[in-house]
Amino acid sequence: MKIKELFKTKKPVISFEIFPPKFDTPLETIYDSLKQFKDLNPDFISVTYGAGGSQKDRTIEISSKIKNEYDVESMAHLTCVGQSEEEIDLMLDSLQKNGIENILALRGDPPINQPDFDFSKGAFRYASELIRYIKSKSNFCIAAAAYVEGHVDCKRLKEDMAYLKKKVDEGVDFLITQLFFDNRLFYDFLDKAAALNINCPVTPGIMPIFKADQIKRITYLCGASIPAKLVIMMDKYENSPEDLRKAGIEYASTQIRDLIDNGVDGVHLLTMNRPKSSKEILQNVGLI
Ligand code: FAD
């Protein structure tokens, strides 16, 4: 099923994001978690694409398993940075053969420690070009990334919004946002998107805080800001990981409750492959 159809009939659409286990970890380690995620009855599960396509086979295999064995709709992330047209064609063919109908089409990040990375060596410079290409030769439902605080590389927020509009106009069916910790940023973003006639569903990405160092690393990379009350929370539970996990779950639950009260199209939970914590959050907000 194309996920865009879900947004026409359900509000909020609840989705999970998972990532493939690392190369040195057997793929099967994710399967037990998949069963637990299925039991939480999400509307769809998306599977990330390792930096530079490093885990592409695993992304396909897990997306296929979710859809064909666990009977949950799936979406494969796909990045184009450094990839040739032939490599993207192979991915699209493989996704199609596995019955996957939904793609989160992304540019992706350059390899770490390569500030002078030459984007022009790949066939597609920006996600908008990848989206146009996929649209021109297939019938996938296409999602794209949006950044409520602006993409980390952009010099001006206004330009980032204009590029987002361009991306949507190339044929995006819905948007998923980068994580954020202050819902006011999201509501402000929705206003700006509406002013630009970005009319597709926008589902907010929510990441519960489990570990302080992890969240600092992630926000450093993606440019999301951490509100002062979260900094205080992380300091308070610095030496008490289980208390921090509980506080992080409470914070994410409060965020999601407020988003639902404000009529969001969906909630995309960045699960960090943790079904137990995901269940606690859904229970807290009354979704199970
Ligand atoms: P784009 O939309 O191409 O934007 C990239 C930058 O270029 C922005 O600064 C934008 O303002 C600018 N720009 C866009 N168009 C133009 C133009 N025409 N001219 C000049 N500048 C322009 N990464 C992974 O590697 N794997 C994943 O699985 C993954 N999943 C993600 C899921 C979500 C929900 C999100 C929000 C991000 C994800 N990412 C993932 C990270 C993403 O790949 C990076 O943020 C990447 O740097 C940008 O990708 P994009 O598709 O947003 O790029």
Image (spheres, rainbow, N blue to C red):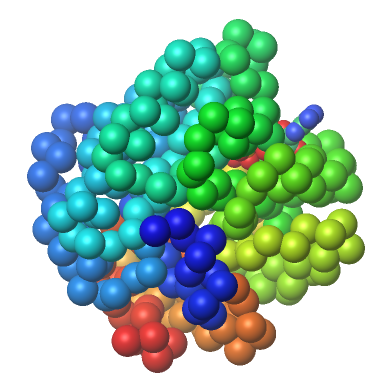
Quadrant where the N terminus is found in the figure: bottom left
Depicted 21 relative to depicted 17: above or below: above
* Frontmost residue, 80 versus 269: 80
Q: Is residue 114 left or right of residue 20?
A: right
* Frontmost residue, 69 versus 157: 69
Give percent across and percent down for residue 60: 29, 37
Q: Is residue 198 left or right of residue 44?
A: right
Depicted 263 relative to depicted 180: above or below: below
- Residue in the picture at 78% in, 41% down: 166
* Frontmost residue, 28 versus 1: 1
Residue 17 in view, yes or no: no
Ligand 1's image quarter is: top right
Quadrant where the C terminus is found in the figure: bottom left
- Residue in the picture at 44% in, 48% down: 102
Numbered disc total: 0
Q: Is residue 98 left or right of residue 168?
A: left
* Frontmost residue, 145 versus 230: 145
Give percent across and percent down for residue 128: 68, 34
Q: Is residue 83 left or right of residue 66?
A: right
- Residue in the picture at 89% in, 63% down: 195
- Residue in the picture at 37% in, 79% down: 281
Give percent across and percent down for residue 144: 60, 47
Residue 199 in view, yes or no: yes
Quarter of the rendering containing residue 283:
bottom left
Give percent across and percent down for residue 261: 61, 89
